[in-house]
Image: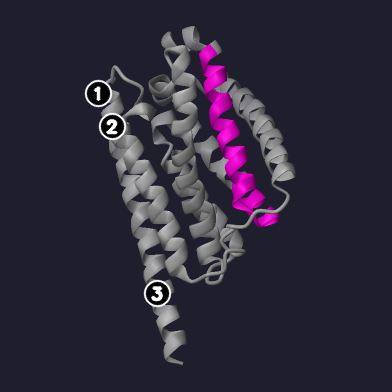
Amino acid sequence: MSGLNTDFAWLTLTRLAILILTGLLAWVTYRSHLLLKEFQPDFNLLLSPAESVVRVLLVGLCLLLAWTSGLPATQLGLVIQEPGRTIGIGIGLGLATVLAVNWLTQWGINRYGRDIYSPLLIQNILPRRGREWVLVGFAFMPAIAMEELLFRSLWIGGFRDVLPLPLLIMGSSIIFGFMHQPQGKLGMLLAGVINVLFSILFVWSGQLLLSLTAHYTVNLLQLAVAHYQRDWLEQY
């Protein structure tokens, strides 16, 4: 009985820590949104050494929370089955998602005006030189891993025993959308919808690898599209 009480206490503390971490990240994102409106850095935000260290530490923190929860790895999606097939499906779904998002972005801007979308964030992480593409590709890894661990493993896997799955997916998607505030109202909406898709992939496959691969593909391809639309973005 004592062991069960200890496990329950650790799980409760872990869930509280997950909520606090999510709140802090949402607040930091909001402050960053305000800062980008007033300050345009002359360096790629993704390649800031301090930012990179923080992202790696956050990945470590998410993994620590997954461990302290005492939940099985299968529930947290921290298992890998048929990695080649899983990665292939993730890349394909990521490509389809980018095509849909780009079409919806253009449609939304044409329908509701330019104020609905902000290119500030993507302009500040778009590689400016050839070698930056490799560095940005690596910098994306901890950033995306942190988001996937938090919103898939810790939110969906960590709370699905106490909250209905649809509520978890919708709640985490609202928060995920809010954390993309620098991209404007349309960016927030599309990010929330994408989070629903990633959450469904996570639940369906039981593997974080699938949603992580799709997420990485989406982000990298969005930069590739932005590269070819650089003139349009600069005149936005």
Distance of label 2 from label 1 (alpha carbons): 7 Å
Residue occupying the point 32% across, 29% down: 48
Task: Identify residue type, mark 3.
Answer: Trp
Q: Is residue 20 above or below residue 45?
A: below
* Cα distance between the residues tagged 1 and 3: 42 Å
The mark nearer the N terminus, 3 or 2, is 3
* First to last magenta residue range: 198-227
Tell which circle, 1 or 3, labels the residue nearer the N-terminal end: 3
- Answer whether residue 7 is visible to the viewer in this image: yes
Task: Name the spot of residue 60 as percent of width and height, x first.
Answer: 40, 52
What number is the disc on residue 219?
none
Q: Residue 10 bears which disc, if any?
A: 3
Residue occupied by mark 1 = 38
The residue tagged 2 is: 34
Q: Quadrant of residue 131?
A: top left
Residue 178: image location, x then y, percent: 42, 42
Dot 3 and dot 2 residues touching (CB under 8 Å): no
Kindly indicate whether the residue at mark 1 contacts the one at mark 2 (C-beta within 8 angstroms).
Answer: yes
Amino acid found under the numbered disc labelled 2:
Leu
